[in-house]
């Protein structure tokens, strides 16, 4: 058994100090549903674990004065589902977070951990990308903001600098006629990893899409923001031609692996199909509200 | 190696125990706390046999460190019956033979109880999705799902 130290600081400054001091031997513990599995399998042997759940801002869900949301990096999927308002404003983000693992896993697993784990197939990430979420990170050199799509660097890697900790996600306020959705393809009906995951966020005014964002997961080394797909949707009435163009943009963005869950050809094709279905759900939700 | 002293509440009782920082909650339950009702199946969060609640939220005890229970409230299968009187779910599992080898049973019961506390009137589909994180290799799930549905109906009628 390796020597392991467990720290549970009560403030962000203490956590940043302890994390930076321990260097590469340190790991952040949020929900722990990835970290403990990696430790157990021997992939990781951390010397120091910094549990961030005793830091109030890490577990807080706040609706900001402008109607946006600030969600602590360690908020569990179950806590997000229990919030009275979050799922009404961001149903797609919520459904993505609540596709991560079982109910037991959702009791602990956080969107922050899902992002920092660096899996291209993390379910919450394409939905957060579609939502236009901004993350706040804090490190030894202070605080900075990043777009959520800038965080993943490749499988298992992020663009956080040494010693930096993900603190929170900020989701913007939503104009009337806005909603979002997330769909993924898996070979089973539950409890599996996405073969393709698509998040779509839309604003619709008088039947025309005025803004759109598309996040695409599990088809490249990192989750992607597909700007060409969004461009194809914006200005359209989500007619067949616009959807076909957006679907083609998603398929074109794919650089997937070939594995037992899906071939390259399958993943590429499904990315387009899912885009159409996800956009339809987001549009239905957006227009229902008005 | 220094052990860590943890103060927590388990099944309503204040508890203290010593553990290694790397011990999981499941290690602590089955070791120093001698609460062996929670089973170790996969130790990777896939099977649900070690399900407990932490502050009323369903979690896998293999996926949390024992030290993380400091100051929190843990409930295990051992706290489910009221003395000698079985919880309605436990009674119904027996009556309807919703178990065979028993390895998954405590996790199934803890998970089902968490569901019924949150949603006293679940549809069959909701029960099946809720229990998707609890693996059973013997029963085919049907008897378990039916037992949960019947218990829910009876508990609502009372």
Image: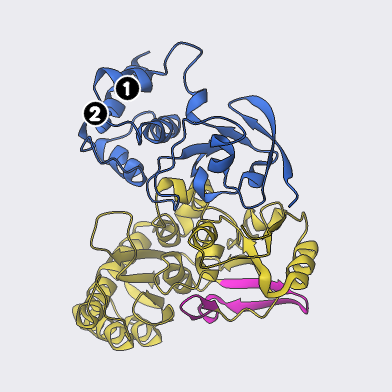
Chain colours: A yellow, B blue
Q: Quadrant of the C terminus of chain A?
A: bottom left
Judge from the rendering whether residue A253 lies leftward or rightward of residue A170; answer left or right: left
The part of the image, by quadrant, that contains residue A204 is bottom left
Q: Please provide percent x and percent y for residue A278.
A: 30, 68
What crowding class fits label 2: few (fewer than 14 Cα within 10 Å), some (14-19), or many (20 or more)? Answer: some
For the question of whether residue A148 can be seen, the reply is yes
Residue placed at 50% from the left, 25% from the top? B78
Task: Name the residue at 63% across, 55% down.
Answer: A62
- Locate the N terminus of chain A and report the quarter of the image it occupies: bottom right
Between the residue at mark 1 and the residue at mark 2, the CA separation in whole angstroms equals 8 Å
**Magenta span dominant secondary structure:** strand
Q: Are marks 1 and 2 on the same chain?
A: yes
State the extent of the magenta-drawn residues as a range.
A134-157
Residue identified by numbered label 2: B146
Q: Secondary structure at mark 1?
A: helix
Residue that mark 1 sits on: B151
Q: To which chain does the residue with label 1 belong?
A: B
> Residue B2 — which label?
none
The percent coordinates of residue A133 (x first, y second) are: 54, 71
Across and down, in percent, residue A267 comes to: 25, 77
User: Which residue is nearer to you in this view: A162 or B36?
Assistant: B36
* Residue A143 relative to residue A196: left or right: right
Residue A164 at what x, y percent from top left? 69, 74
- Reply yes or no: does residue A28 show up in magenta: no
Q: Residue at x 38, y 18 (%)?
A: B88
In the rendered image, residue A139 lying in the magenta stretch gets the answer yes
């Amino acid at each position: 058994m390796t020597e392991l130290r467990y720290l549970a600081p009560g403030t962000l400054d203490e956590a940043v100090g302890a994390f930076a001091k321990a260097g590469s031997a340190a790991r952040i513990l949020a929900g722990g549903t990835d970290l403990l599995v990696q430790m157990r399998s021997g992939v990781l042997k951390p010397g120091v674990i910094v549990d961030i759940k005793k830091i109030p801002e890490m577990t807080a869900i706040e609706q900001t004065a402008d109607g946006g949301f600030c969600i602590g990096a360690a908020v569990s999927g179950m806590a997000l589902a229990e919030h009275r308002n979050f799922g009404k404003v961001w149903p797609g983000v919520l459904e993505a977070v609540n596709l991560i693992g079982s109910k037991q896993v959702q009791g602990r697993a956080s969107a922050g951990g899902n992002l920092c784990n660096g899996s291209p197939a993390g379910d919450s990430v394409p939905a957060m990308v579609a939502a236009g979420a901004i993350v706040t990170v804090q490190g030894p050199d202070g605080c900075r903001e990043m777009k959520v799509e800038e965080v993943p660097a490749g499988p298992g890697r992020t663009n956080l600098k040494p010693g930096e900790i993900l603190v929170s996600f900020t989701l913007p306020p939503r104009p009337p006629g806005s909603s979002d959705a997330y769909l993924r393809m898996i070979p089973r009906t539950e409890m599996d990893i996405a073969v393709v995951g698509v998040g779509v966020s839309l604003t619709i005014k008088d039947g025309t899409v005025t803004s759109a964002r598309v996040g695409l997961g599990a088809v490249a080394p990192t989750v992607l923001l597909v700007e060409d797909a969004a461009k194809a949707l914006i200005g359209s009435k989500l007619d067949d031609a616009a959807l076909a163009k957006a679907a083609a943009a998603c398929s074109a963005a794919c650089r997937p692996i070939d594995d037992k869950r899906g071939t390259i050809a399958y993943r590429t094709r499904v990315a387009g199909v899912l885009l159409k279905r996800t956009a339809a759900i987001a549009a239905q939700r957006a227009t229902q509200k008005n | 190696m220094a052990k860590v002293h943890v103060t927590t509440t388990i099944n309503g009782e204040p508890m203290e125990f010593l553990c290694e920082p790397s011990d999981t909650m499941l290690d602590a339950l089955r070791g120093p706390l001698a609460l062996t009702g929670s089973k170790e199946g996969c130790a990777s969060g896939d099977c649900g046999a070690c399900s407990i609640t932490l502050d009323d939220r369903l979690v896998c005890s293999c996926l949390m460190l024992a030290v993380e229970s400091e100051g929190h409230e843990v409930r295990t299968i051992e706290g489910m019956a009221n003395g000698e009187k079985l919880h309605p779910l436990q009674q119904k599992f027996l009556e309807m033979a919703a178990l065979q080898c028993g390895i998954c049973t405590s996790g199934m019961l803890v998970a089902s109880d968490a569901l019924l506390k949150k949603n006293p009137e679940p549809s069959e589909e909701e029960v099946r999705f809720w229990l998707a994180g609890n693996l059973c290799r013997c029963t085919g799930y049907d008897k378990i799902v039916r037992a949960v549905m019947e218990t829910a109906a009876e508990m609502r009628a009372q």
